[in-house]
Image (cartoon, rainbow, N blue to C red):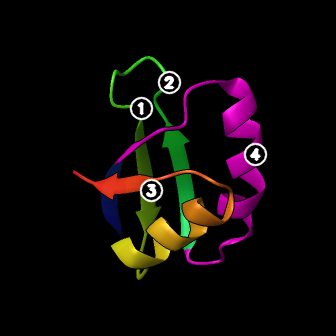
């Protein structure tokens, strides 16, 4: 399992509610979490085989940006 981390613009619980269905629907993601207390709003994704580009596109579908850190 690999861990990918992304700086995001997911700022609050409402934002999280918008991106949650997209991340949960991605079958390659085993688990994920967004640290809303971090200044960079770090999204952590646990997966065997997802790419950074796939995570970026999944988050983008919800209207947010995820840049690898």
Spatial CA distance of label 1 from label 4 is 15 Å
Residue position marked by numbered label 2 in the rendering: 36
- Nearer to me, 48 or 18: 18
Mark 2 and mark 1 residues within 8 Å of each other at the beta carbon: yes
Mark 2 and mark 4 residues within 8 Å of each other at the beta carbon: no
- Which callout, 2 or 4, points at the residue further toward the start of the chain? 4
Spatial CA distance of label 4 from label 3 is 17 Å
Residue position marked by numbered label 1 in the rendering: 41
Q: Is residue 60 above or below residue 27?
A: above
Residue at left 53%, top 72%?
A: 57
Q: Is residue 39 above or below residue 17?
A: above
- Which callout, 1 or 4, points at the residue further toward the start of the chain? 4
Q: Secondary structure at mark 2?
A: loop
Residue position marked by numbered label 3 in the rendering: 45
In the rendered structure, does residue 9 fall within the stretch colored magenta?
yes
Residue position marked by numbered label 4 in the rendering: 18
> Of tags 2 and 4, which is closer to the observer?
4
Q: Secondary structure at mark 1?
A: loop
């Amino acid at each position: 399992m690999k861990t990918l981390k992304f700086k995001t613009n997911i700022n609050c619980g409402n934002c999280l509610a918008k991106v949650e269905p997209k991340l949960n629907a991605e079958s390659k993601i085993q688990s994920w979490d967004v640290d809303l207390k971090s200044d960079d709003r770090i999204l952590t994704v646990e997966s065997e085989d997802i790419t950074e580009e796939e995570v970026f596109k999944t988050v983008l579908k919800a209207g947010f940006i995820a840049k690898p850190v």
